[in-house]
Image: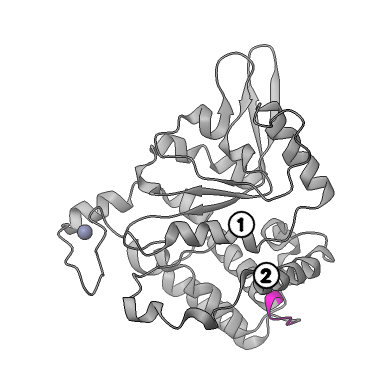
Amino acid sequence: MIGPPGSGKTMLAKRLAGVLPPLSFTEAIETTKIHSIAGMLPPGAGLVRGRPFRAPHHTVSDAGLIGGGSGMPRPGEASLAHHGVLFLDELPEFPRNVLEMLRQPLEDASITIARANLTLCFPSSFMLVAAMNPCPCGFNGDATRECRCTPGIIQRYLSKISGPLLDRIDIHVEVPAVPFKELRGQEAAEPSSAIRERVSRARQTQETRGFINARLPVRLLRRHCELDEAAERTLEMAVRRLGLSARAHDRILKVARTIADLGGAHGVSAKHIAEAVQYRSLDRNYWT
Ligand SMILES: [Zn+2]
């Protein structure tokens, strides 16, 4: 999420954990085990029932984020967020080497820690949610406040996040500051419970294919994301115009499949592809 300070990025991230389906029994046991070996369960506590929401500060050490430390290696935030949400606020403030370490869990859903005398593997299947300002002062692109950053400063700020990490993030959205008068009349907003129901249904559809969309293997992608001719053309055009990597192309397909699943659609149409492409705002605006 890219937006100025105070636009509600942190609140949105917290709500996200609330619209995910409840933990299954197996998931609850896995999550509980990790919290238990990390010494984070009070004595007599039962199963962890809610999806974890972890929000480490940008001063976190690599061991704190990924796991390890002196003595017996302990799970880090990336494992404590297993089956839940890992939220990194002010993403460009995290040291680059720490961020780069997230690439393994994002690919493999686990973290391997090798020591001279033992190798440990901690599960870490989390949803990464990150937030950042559009520039160091926070007001680049804002209609009401003036940004005082030079293009060079903005470029340096954005380039703290590497292309390979960005490539592994499916959805980039801009979160503009909401003018006060638009904050009124929010009664009509859909409650989290209704959204959670829709998410649960979409997940069930995905499970009948054997994988949730985020974990769909590339070789099965085309079988489950059947595109009609217009969708195929839309995708081709987006890839060419934005110069997308093969990985970004696959991500767009998966996100489009998810949008179709949320709407209960069987096939993936041009409008699903177009919406998924909209969610690549960093490819569209910032890195060109
Ligand atoms: Zn600025």
Q: Nearer the viewer, residue 198 or 225?
A: 198
Residue at image position (80%, 67%) is 204
Mark 1 nearby-residue class (10 Å; few <14, some 14–19, many ≥20): many
Based on the picture, tell me whether residue 262 belongs to the magenta stretch: yes
In which quadrant of the rendered image does the C terminus lie?
bottom left
Report the label total.
2
Residue at image position (35%, 68%) is 285
Q: Main secondary structure of the magenta part?
A: loop
In the image: residue 36, left or right of residue 231: right
> At label 2, which amino acid type do we have?
Ser
Quick one: SS at disc 1? helix
The residue under label 1 is: 17
Q: Nearer the viewer, residue 91 or 8?
A: 8
Which image quadrant for residue 109? top right
Which image quadrant for residue 267? bottom right
Quick one: SS at disc 2? helix
Residue at image position (68%, 75%) is 262
Q: CA distance from mark 1 to mark 2?
A: 12 Å
Residue 13 in percent (x, y) is at: 51, 58
Give the vertical position of 25 relative to 206 (above or below).
above
- Earlier residue among tags 1 and 2: 1
Q: In this orientation, does residue 96 appear?
A: yes
The residue under label 2 is: 193
Q: In this orientation, does residue 288 appear?
A: no
Residue 143 in percent (x, y) is at: 23, 75
Q: Which residues are magenta?
A: 261-265
Based on the picture, tell me whether residue 175 belongs to the magenta stretch: no
Give the vertical position of 251 relative to 105 (above or below).
below
Give the vertical position of 151 relative to 99 (above or below).
below
Quadrant location, ligand no. 1: bottom left
